[in-house]
Amino acid sequence: MAQANSKEPKNSQKRLFLGVLLIPFLALLTALIVGAVVMLAFGDDPILAYQGLFQGAFGSGRAWSVTIRKMIPFILTGLSVAVAFKAGLFNIGASGQFVMGSVCSVAIGIHFEGLPMIIHLPLSILSGMLGGMIWGAIPGLLKVTTGAHEVIVTIMMNYLASLFAGWTVYAGGTQGQTPGPLWDRTARAISETPDVFESAQIPWLFGPPYRVHYGVFLALIFVVLVWWLIYKTTIGFEIRTVGQNPKAARYAGIRVEKTVVLTMGLAGALAGLAGTIETLGLNHKFAPEFGGQVGFDGITVALLGQTHPFGVVIASFLFGALDAGAAKMQFESGVAADIIQVIQALVLAFVAAPLIIKALFRLRSSGDEEHATKLNTSWGGS
Amino acid sequence: MNFWSRTARISVCLTLIMMVMAILVEITPLGENPWMRVFFGVSALNLTLRAAIPLVLGALSGILCERSGIINIGIEGMMLAGAFAGFVAKSSTNDWPLYASLLYSVLVALGVGGLMGLLHGLFSIRFRMDQIISGTVIIILAAGLSSYLYDRDAISAGKFTPIPIPLLSEIPVIGPVLFDNAPITYLALILVFVVHFAIFHTRWGLRTRAVGEHPRAADTEGINVNRQRYVNTMMGGMLAGLAGGFLVLEAVGQFQEGMTAGRGFISLAAMIFGNWTPFGALGAATLFGYTQALQNEFLLAGVTTIPRQFVSMLPYIVTIVAVSGLVGRVRPPAAIGKPYDTEGSK
Amino acid sequence: MSESAILEARQISKYFPGVVANEDVNLSLNSGEILALLGENGAGKSTLMNIIYGLYQPSAGEILVKGQSVRMHSPRDAIDLGIGMVHQHFQLVPVMTVVENVMLGSESVRQGFLDRERVSKRIKQLSQDYQLEVDPTALVEDLPVGIRQRVEIIKALYREADILILDEPTAVLTPQEIEGLFSVMDLLRKQGKSIIFITHKLKEVLRIADRISVLRRGRVVGEATPLEATEPGLAAMMVGREVMLQVDKKEAQPGKPVLQVKGVEARDDLGEICLRNVELQIHAREIVGVAGVQGNGQTELVEVLTGLRKLDQGTLRIGGQELTNKNPREITDQGGICHVPEDRHAFGMVAGYSVANNLVLNSYYKPPFANGVTVRQEAIEQHAEVLVEKFDVRTPSVQTSGGSLSGGNQQKMVIARELSRPIQLLVAAQPTRGIDVGSIEFIHQQIVAKRDEGVAVLLVSSELDEILALSDRIVVMYRGSIIGEVYGKDATRQQLGLLMAGVKSTLTEGLD
C-alpha cells in the first residue's frame, strides 16, 4: 500500500465528508424520483402530489407546527436506533420501548393529584424512561448471557409490550375480565386511560391551533446529551469500540457484555422517552393503538442520519416534513398518503446499500463501504 | 438432521394427545366440564388449524430462505404483498367462473411473493445490504404499496370453500377437523412433507444445506453459491405469498390493510422454534395456533378471569425462551447472514 | 516407476499485487509415486496446489495432465481430470453425514431422490480397499480430526481421482494417526495412484516419499530422493544459508527472570490440545525468540500470556506475580505487559478510529486522557503527536483513520501505543509481517532499545531472519511444546530449520 502523503488526506477527508452527505441526499432524491415514477405508473400526478406535500409541510405556520410536532418522536426513536447501531446492535424494539414509556409515564401522570408540576412532570418522564430502559435492557441481557439475537427478541417484546399496554387500559370484557389498572372508568366501553393531570402535562410552547409543546426542546437537549455521551465520554468510547471491533475492545480491557446491556438500556430509555413525550405532551393519555410504526421509522431515520445524532435531527426533520405533508398531499392531489411509506422504504434501501445508488448513478466505488457499521449477524442460539 | 428431531417428536406426540382428548371430550362425559371443552373441544381444534396454516407457510418460507444462508425477517412483507396481490387479482376477475378466478389469484399471489423474494435476494446478494435491513425494507415497502394501491371499494366475490375428503372426513370428531378443509389448507400440509423431502432427500436440498452451512465447501465442489441462494429466496417468497393468498382467498375473503398482523414474525418464531425443519415448524405453528384458539375459547366460554392479553402473550414468550436456548439449543445454519465472497478463493 | 509423467507443471508463475507467490516452478509427478513438496510458510506450496486444483489461474506457464496441456477454470475441471485435493482446512460440512459430504456436488440420484444407499456402499468399498475405515452414517461434527481426514480422502477417491494432493495432512494428527495415514498412502501408491504430499516435516518426507521437491520463496530450490538426501541438507534447502538481516545489538546482559511459564497446557478453538507442558523463562534485558512453523502453538502461547485464552494447566508469573488466567486488563496493568499482536486488525487496532484514538485504546479511561467520565480529546491528540513523532508513524495527521495508513505505519502505531507505557515484558507476535523494509528496521531498533532499558522481550516470528538477528536466545516450538533451545549467537539457520521440522538431533545445543 502506498504511503499517504500530505496532499492525500485532505482529499480523502473531503471525499469521506462528501460521501457521508452525498449518499443520504442522493438517497432521498432518488426515492422521491422513484416515488414519482410509481405514482405515474398508477395514474397519479406526482407534481401535484409533491406540491401538496410541500404545502402541508412548509406552506403555513400551521404546517410548520405539524412538521415540528411530527419530528419529535422521530428524533428520539432515531437516536435510540442510532445508539444501538453504534455498539453493533440492531434495535427493532423501539416501538415496544415507546409503548412501555407511554404506559409508565401515564401511570404516574394519572395518579398523585395535587403534586406540584416541578415534581410531577419530571417524575412521570423519568418513569417513562425507566420503563423503556428496562424494556431495552432485557434483550441486551439475554444477548450477553444466552446469545439470543436481539432482533427476534425485540420483535417479540414489541408484541408483549402492546399486549401488556392493551391490558392496562382494557375496558373490561363482557365475559368477566376485569378492567385494566389504568383504565378510565368514565370512558365506558373505550379502552384508554383518563387524562393525565395538568401537573404532569408538558406545557405548550405555542398553544392551539399550533400545538407545539416544550417536548421539542427536551428532544433537542437529549440530542446534545447523546452526542456528548457517544463522542465525548469514556462510556461512549467503549460503546463505539465494541461496535467497530469487539475483539480489539475485549483485548483493550473493555467489558463487552456490560457495554452491550448498557447500550440497549440506553436505547430503550430514549425510545421510552419518545413515547413519554408524545403522551405527556400531545395526547395527555394513552390508548392502545399507539405505537405501531415508530420502530421502522426510527431505523430509517437513524440510517439516513448516518447514525450520528446531528444527522438524526436532520433526517427527522425531513421525515417529519414528509409525514406532515402527507395529509395535505392526499387532500390536494388525491394521492393516498401511503405513498410516503413507499418512499420511506426506498430511502432506507438506498441508504443501506450505497451500492444501489452507485449503480444507478454510475458512481465509482470509493472502497469506503466499511463505514457502514458492522452488525452482528446470525441468530445466535447454539 | 434425521426425521425424528426433538421438536418434531414432541409435536407429533402433542398432536396425538390432542386428538385423543378431543375424541374423549366429544363422546364421553368428560365433555361436560367447560374447561375440557375449552382446551380440547372441536372448536378449539378447528381454530388451531385455521390459525396455524399461514404460520406454517410462513415458516416454510423462512426455512427455504435461511437454510441457504440468507436471513429473512421480511416474511411479514412478502405475506402482505401476496395477500394484496391475490386480492387485486380476485376482485378484478369476479366475473370469471369462481374456481378459475380463485386459481388465477393464487398464482398471482405466488408470483408477487416470488418477486418480493427476488428483491430480497437482490438486496442481500448483489447489493450486499445487511440482510436484516433488507427484510425491513421489504416489510415497509409491502405495507406502503398495498395501502397506497388499495381501492377500498373493491370487493372480491367468493373464496375457497372446504372440500371434504370422502371417507376420511367421516371419522368421528377429528375427521371433519382434518379432512374437511379448503384447498390451500390441504396444500400447506402437503407442502410440509414436500419441503421436508426436498431438503433432506434431493440434490437441490443437499446443496441448499451445504450452501447455508459451509459455502466454501460447496464452492470447491463447483456449486454456484449465489445462484442457489437466489433460487431459494425466490421460492421462499412464493410460499410467503401463498400464505398471504390464504388469508385473502380462503380465510377472510377480503383484504384489510395490515391484515397479516404480525403473522410473518410469528412464522419466524415458528421456524426458529422448529429448528429450521418443516415438521418442527409444523409443530411450532400448531402450538402458536393453539394459543390463539385458546384465547378465543376462553372468551367465548367465559371460564376465567385471566386477562386474555396474557394468554395472547404465550407465543411470544415461548419464542423468546426458545431463542435463548433455555429449552435446548436451536441451531441456525452456520453460514447465515454473511454474504459469500467468491473473490476469497481467487 | 513409469517414465511418462502423469502431472506436470511447466514454468508456472503466479503473481499477486506486490507478491511473487510462484516463479518459474517446474514440477513433475509420475504415475504411482509420492512426491513430497517441502517448504516453509510462504514458500508458495499452497498457491501452487491451488493452481493445480483449478482454484487459481497461473500468471504464466502451463499444466499438463497425462501429457495433455490443460486450462482449468474451476475445481470442477480439475476433478474431471482426475485430480483430487485433501485440504489442510477440511472442506466438510459439520452437520451433514459422511455420505452427504462425500456426494456433495457429485450426487447420486435415483428417481429424483438422493441415493444414499449407493454412495454408502461405495464408501464402504473404498474403506475396505484403502484402509480408510469410516462410518458412512456418522455426522462429521462427531468425528475426531483423524477420521475427518479420511472422509476428505474418500471424497477425492469417490470422484475417481488418480492424482491426490495432500496439503499438510499430518499437521492435525497424532503420531499414531500419522502412521495410519502413511499406510493408507502406501496402499494408494500400490494401487497406482499418484500423490503430491505437502509438508514441512523432514522425517515424514524421508519416510514416505519417492521424490522430493523443495520450494523456497516461490521457486524450486532443490530436488532429491530420500536415498540421497539428508535432513541437514534438506533443512538447508528449505531455509537457505544466507543471513540477510543485521541489527545493531550489544551483548545481552540478562537480569532477573520476568516471565515464568511452567507446565502450561491449553486447548485451541476446536478443543484440541495446542500447548503441551510448555515451560519458558525470560529475563529482564533479554530477547527470547520463538521460532517455528506457524500452527505449532505459538499463537496460542501468546494468547495465554496476554489473557486472551485460558490455560487448562500450569502457571504464569510475571515479575513474580501470579497472573494465571487473569483477564487482559488485569494482566496488562498488573503484569506491566504489552502486546504487539499478530493480527493487528483483529486485536490491535480499530480501523475506523483515528490514529489518536488508537493510541489510547487501552488507556482512554485513565488521566490525563479522561477526567472522570469525560474524555479529553486535546490530551489524547497531544499524546498522539508526541508518539507519532517518536515512533516515526507516517500519517497526514493524528486524526486520520488508522485503517488508511499503510501496513508498516499501522504496525508502528500499535507499537507506539504498546511501548509507550511503563512495562516489564514485551510480547511481539509477527511484528513485521507484511511490512516495508524501512519500517521493519525501525521496529527492530525499538525492540532492541526496549531490551536495553531493562524489558524482557518475547519475540514470536516465522521469519527466521528476524529471529536470528534479534534474539539473544532462541526456542523452537513444534507441535505445542518447546523442542529445543539455542543461544542466539551460536544459532544457524540449519540448526533451526531442523528443529522447526521436528528433528531433535545431537547437533543442537541445549542450555542445561
Image: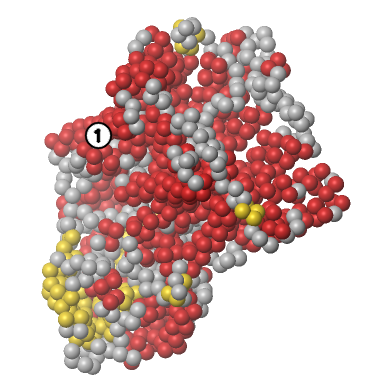
Say which residue appears at 17% left-offset and 34% top-offset: A11
The image position of residue A62, as x and y in percent, is 41, 10
Viewer-proximal residue, B306 or C88?
A: B306
Tell me the kind of residue under disc 1: Gly
Parent chain of label 1: A
Q: Is residue C202 left or right of residue C274?
A: left
Q: Position of residue A78 (x, y in %)?
A: 43, 29
Relative to A354, say whether B284 is above or below. Answer: below
Name the element at disc 1: helix
* Residue sitting at x 31%, y 49%: B126
C124 with respect to C457 (left or right): right
Which quadrant is the C terminus of chain C positioned in? bottom left
Residue A359 in view, yes or no: yes
Q: Can you give x and y, in whole percent of width and height, for residue A353 in the image?
A: 32, 41
- At a point 71% along the width and 46% down the height, the residue shown is B44
Q: Name the image quarter holding the N terminus of chain C.
A: bottom left
Q: Residue at x 49, y 68 (%)?
A: B201
